Image (spheres, grey):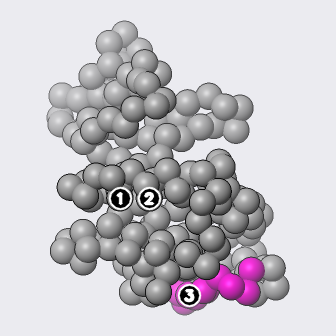
Amino acid sequence: MPLISILIINWNTCSFLRDCLESIYTSLTELNPDDLEIVVVDNASTDGSAEMLADSFPQVRLIISEENLGFAGGNNLGLDFCHGDYVLLLNPDTRLLEGAVEALHNFLEKCPETGGVGSRYLNPDGSLQVSCYPLPTLGRELWRLLHLDVLFPVGVYAMGDWSVIHPRQVEVLQGASLMLRRQVIDQV
């Protein structure tokens, strides 16, 4: 049984998906590729994604959906094919940095009371990208929509001021790179 299942939902992102999959394998520092199970749900792509996977990544389990189920529907379908103790939800346009999978896994191993952990996201130029938010409220959403967070952050976190070494508890994580305990998924 794999330790970690990586679940990727694809819809016409063939070149991004290739880069994403290559980054998974090159990012590993402690884990062996045999510790991973990679499942790709293809949401009725027409760009040759399925053929690319069959040719270049035969070890990846491909689930083909006849219709575009979207992100949530694709993940719900794919979770049935994930057998790892941990599941990493990963967008196909992400590229993992060295040690990323292990860092997420190690954190969950050290903190058994934690159900999920998210990544810090960087743009291609290395600048910080938003990866989490405070719980939305009517006031926070209005504040955010009026772009008042540039004056005083209320609808977003001031992530630029956060330590890159110490983890932080947040209210809402984005799902582009989110590792969850399988038992938490099963409970939900």
Give the x, y percent position of residue 88: 46, 65
Q: Distance between the residues labelled 1 and 2?
A: 6 Å
Badge 2 amino acid: His
Q: Name the residue under label 1.
A: 109
Mark 3 surroundings within 10 Å by alpha-carbon count, few (fewer than 14), some (14 through 19), many (20 or more): some
Relative height, residue 113 to residue 70 (above, below): above
Relative height, residue 178 to residue 71 (above, below): above
Q: Which range is magenta?
A: 57-66
Badge 3 amino acid: Ile
Give the x, y percent position of residue 73: 40, 75
Give the x, y percent position of residue 148: 35, 17
Q: Mark 3 points at which residue?
A: 63
- The one nearer the camera, 88 or 42, is 88
Query: Of helix, strand and loop, which one carries label 2?
Result: helix
Name the mark on residue 185.
none
Q: In this view, does 99 lie to the left or right of 68?
A: right
Q: Name the residue under label 2.
A: 105
**83 magenta-colored:** no
Q: Quadrant of residue 140?
A: top left
Q: How far apart are marks 1 and 3 (CA)?
A: 29 Å
Mark 1 surroundings within 10 Å by alpha-carbon count, few (fewer than 14), some (14 through 19), many (20 or more): few
> Which one is in front in this view, the residue at disc 2 or the one at disc 3?
2
At 63% from the left and 71% from the top, the residue drawn is 32
* Discs 1, 2 touching: Cβ within 8 Å: yes
Badge 1 amino acid: Glu
At 24% from the left and 69% from the top, the residue drawn is 184
